[in-house]
Image (cartoon, coloured by chain):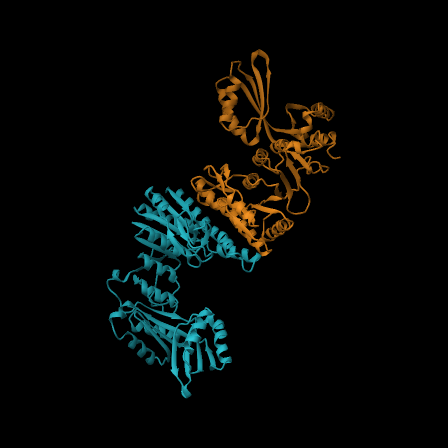
Chain colours: A cyan, B orange
Amino acid sequence: MLIVQKFGGTSVGDLDRIQNVAKRVSAVKKAGNDVIVVVSAMSGETNKLLSYAEHFSKAPVKAEMDMLLSSGERVTASLLAIALSELGHNAVSMTGRKAGIVTNNIHTKARIEEINPLIMQEAIKEGKIIVVAGFQGVSQDGNVTTLGRGGSDLSAVAIAGALKADLCEIYTDVSGIFTTDPRIEPKAKKLDMISYDEMLELASLGAKVLQNRSVELAKKLNVNLVTRTSFSDEEGTLITKEENIMEKPLVSGIALDKNQARISLVGVKDRPGIASDIFTKLSNNNVNVDMIIQNVGHDGRANIDFTVPVNDIDDAKEVVETFVKESEIDKVSYDENICKVSIVGVGMKSHTGVAAKAFSMMAKENININMISTSEIKVSMVIDEKYAELAVRSLHAAYELDK
Amino acid sequence: MLIVQKFGGTSVGDLDRIQNVAKRVSAVKKAGNDVIVVVSAMSGETNKLLSYAEHFSKAPVKAEMDMLLSSGERVTASLLAIALSELGHNAVSMTGRKAGIVTNNIHTKARIEEINPLIMQEAIKEGKIIVVAGFQGVSQDGNVTTLGRGGSDLSAVAIAGALKADLCEIYTDVSGIFTTDPRIEPKAKKLDMISYDEMLELASLGAKVLQNRSVELAKKLNVNLVTRTSFSDEEGTLITKEENIMEKPLVSGIALDKNQARISLVGVKDRPGIASDIFTKLSNNNVNVDMIIQNVGHDGRANIDFTVPVNDIDDAKEVVETFVKESEIDKVSYDENICKVSIVGVGMKSHTGVAAKAFSMMAKENININMISTSEIKVSMVIDEKYAELAVRSLHAAYELDK
């Protein structure tokens, strides 16, 4: 098998942990596999370098930030290669450039455009373990770039895709994907498998193990992704295409997102295109609108409720207040004490009654549902934040996720 | 003018010092000059990375050491470019690769083979300040290499040569080249100018401001080298070709090297080629022999005395003991309590009596001279180490270097 293993900052957080990673990689290689390792900077290093840059400038030149920040991964990569050599392997570190990771030239958040896998393929043929500095690539004009948050995961997935690896293992400090947050429901179970689409829904709903960019890329390149912990030998969770999952559970998990706020527009003027105006301007102001409900109120004016991430509230206020000034909206209210509870599962596609069961559970617990949205594999409900944990535990039990 | 400025580890030792360097570079640029800056890693960084590598291996793979160690200079280069941008300049950092510094592939002590100055020339034309990560290059096969001790100085000199810079300033924590070590003779004076050859003699004799590799390269490429301090505006010392020095002093400086040992071979067998055998084997064993004296002793056997650096004594012992075993040498003795005092000056070429004055000074102070060697611009004497400082001060006064 060809296995790509990615180790994040906490997994390579100090020299002893790097030594542990070396032992783990060594065992996989000795079992007869080919291995490509992708590493992040030692935890704390990137923040240290960021603080250095901020000492000189509030808005440092982005190309220089890439030059600066890409050094952290180089250090980890060479140290791990040295540790692997000491264990008797033929190991070689590679920068993003050497590994053939070509990006566009949007510094600090570049997108991978292609992988030229020749040098890596040659090294694999020679029996070498490759250690790639994650998070970085090289632009067409030859400058080092970085891939933004979660960039090392992206490096790993892209390499696994380009080299048609059998597996891409993402090592973090979490042992896998759970049916819900174990801090809320201790009976939460680790999932053995989950589909890309379910993972995408869970990630966007607040389960922070993997970023959506990485899962999307894995789906596009058909990469079998495993998320597991580097601190034990526990098996992780396989994220793969739906067809590979034999027994499709009705519901895979319950996600909770407390990071939402509701904006209520009361008395919206009845003129054609006004809703479009409002939401276009919100979008242009970088506000991520999630759910929207519109009710026709009295005297012909409508009420529109919508949710946004809490961080976007100020940007949203800026937009809607202009409509209030122009008397196109009577009144605006904001509510940060809400949350979004979601039920995710590919099984919903072929089974009815999943949403109905959720609504009746909420009724049984006397929890009022403010807003609802559904997709093929998801039911989301906005409720009062104080009921968040209660709702999660009730739903987790209702769909028998603890069994 | 095109000026190359190189700042060593202590000059960029912390963020405030980097800010000071930025101000200094900015002033030179604003005065109408083009500037290329070469930087070392922040002091302590390289040693930290070395200790990391040693945690994993006593003899880490050298190519990985280059990957590891080259990151320190990248960090300084990008930080300085950010600081210069903040001061309103168009500044860009470059790795050794980007700056076109091509080396052979002897990792950890690569030699510069050529500089492809096109990218730097283009940037200079565009009015940019270039900040080059020193100490590093790229091998013909595309791997990062480092240049060994004093490597950043070499980067600076090579760049100055390739771009025909008017000046190459090497900033350290020392303000220039002195007539002798001011810790021994407080009346020592800073020299305004000195020739390459004199500098080479002084450096090899223990004045540690610049390494000989850099001075040799400056001589070869005809680079006007200035060594000065980054901690004040004091003028430094210009190292240039002899023809540029109008008033050639008889003696430029007195150097002291305590790091020498004498090996005495007593009763060397009288057979043709034996001296050649001994010194060839010493050379093959990496022993740097400096001075040699041979006396014919009684019964046809000779005595040979020679000096080596203290660090080479064990390697030297290994060689000479084999001759003792084979009865080609009767006895060997070692003396580490010696030192070498040298008088250096281009003026000696055209003036006689310099050596005679030195010998008579030694006689006056009752200092016994064990060995003597001379070159066109140097007189060296081996004396008992306990007279080292006395000899330096006497000679400094005798040649009126304090005037």
Where in the figure is residue B397, as x and y percent of width and height?
Answer: 74, 31
Where in the figure is residue B265, as x and y percent of width and height?
Answer: 56, 20
B215 w.r.t. A237: above or below: above
A182 w.r.t. B150: above or below: below
In depth, the one of A224 and B114 nearer the eye is: B114
Is A299 left, or right, of B173 in this rendering? Answer: left
Report the number of numbered marks: 0
In depth, the one of A306 and A363 nearer the eye is: A306
In depth, the one of A53 and A286 nearer the eye is: A286
Which residue is at the far bottom? A299
| Observer able to see residue A164 | yes
Where in the figure is residue A298, as x and y percent of width and height?
Answer: 41, 87
Q: Quadrant of the C terminus of chain A?
A: bottom left
Which residue is at the far top? B299
Which residue is at the far right? B403
| Observer able to see residue A175 | no
Where in the figure is residue A26, as x and y percent of width and height?
Answer: 35, 47
In depth, the one of A295 and A360 nearer the eye is: A295
Is B304 left, or right, of A15 in this rendering? Answer: right
Is B19 left, or right, of A288 in this rendering? Answer: right
Is B345 left, or right, of A360 in this rendering? Answer: right
A172 w.r.t. A295: above or below: above
Residue at the spot x=54%, y=28% of the render? Answer: B288
